[in-house]
Amino acid sequence: MFVPTIDLKAAEKDVTILSPLDAACRDHGFFLLRNHGMDDAIEQMWRAASAFFDQPSEVKREVLRTESIPLGYYDRELTKRKRDLKEVFDYMQPRADGSDRNQWPAGQSEFFDAMNRFFTEASSVAERTLRLVYRALAGDGISQLATPEGDPRTSTVRLNYYPVADPLSGDEQLAVAGLGDMALHHHTDPGVLTLLLQDMTGGLQTLSKEDGWIDVTPEESTIVVNLGDSLQVWSNDNYRAAIHRVVPMTTLKNGSDGRFSTPYFYNPKGDAMLEPLSALSADTPRYRPFTWREYIKGRVDDNYTDLGEEDIQIAQYRV
């Protein structure tokens, strides 16, 4: 099984070219998009992200996220009860009405402008991409009118930086979970789908039902798309939430001291119910109904603290 590359504009006009996308979504949940129209916004985002992570730790930690303020910078996240070798900056849709919950670095208007533009354009591409996925799935009799949507208001962007060395000091390392053997341990994303920008370093892998772990090889000017848990539930397991991981770097390119990636997590509406669509489940639904709020709360809590068990997964909601 391979990871296909889909021309977004062409596929919107000709559904007959969606067969590779359909096959990939059933096997591993990954595909690449080209001709998406976001090149300028992506380049602006890369410059701003690189400049942010290049700052001293004490500056980045001025916008440190906490359990009560879950947006901002973080350098000790857990996946599968192990600490990832990465630094992140999380934000949601910027708002100008005084209700913005983001933590923005002080005096860095270029950073805000770049992230605001990127979020706006990624939201549009995510909506278009979800329509493509539903059209690929339509062969199973699903009604376009009955398909749940994503919502930019619940969606998030994460800037990832994977350094070679541990970003924590020796004393800090003793106070937190130890590093695992992966830059990012295997997991699925909880939302509908993810748009991922990765640099040309590589290291992203997905678990194919047919071939085991396979590389999601970087391609210039493409966006990586992977399906999330919510879409797997809605599709009643016809489509697969992508199990993926990031392996440790063995070589660095262009003189860089780390690797960058930026996912846009396209999430369900805040009051969404996660349950199989009737057109795809008939008398055999594979999940009991549960709410998006319930599910995402458990996933976020797992990021901060080792709760003594594996991360919350959709398998816990199977019938």
Image: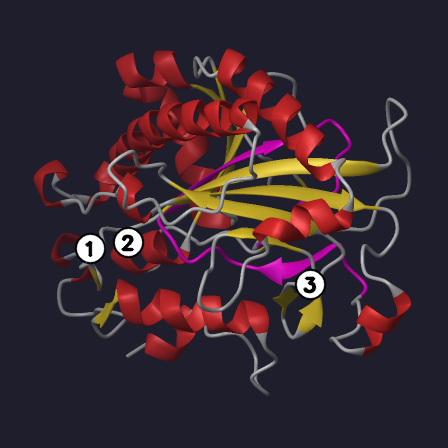
Q: Which residue is mark 2?
A: 235
Q: Which residue is mark 3?
A: 76
Residue 314 vs residue 1: left or right? left
Nearer the observer, 42 or 235: 42
Mark positioned earlier in the residue sequence (3 or 1):
3
Mark positioned earlier in the residue sequence (2 or 3):
3
Label 3 element class: loop
| Mark whose residue sits in front, 2 or 1 | 2
Label 1 element class: helix
Residue 17: x, y in percent? 38, 20
Residue located at (39% from left, 58% from top): 229
Nearer the observer, 248 or 15: 248
Residue located at (23% from left, 68% from top): 291
Residue located at (57% from left, 50% from top): 63
Q: Is residue 293 above or below residue 222?
A: below
Q: Is residue 222 above or below residue 209?
A: above
- The part of the chain drawn in magenta is 181-208
Q: Are marks 2 and 1 in contact (CB under 8 Å)?
A: yes
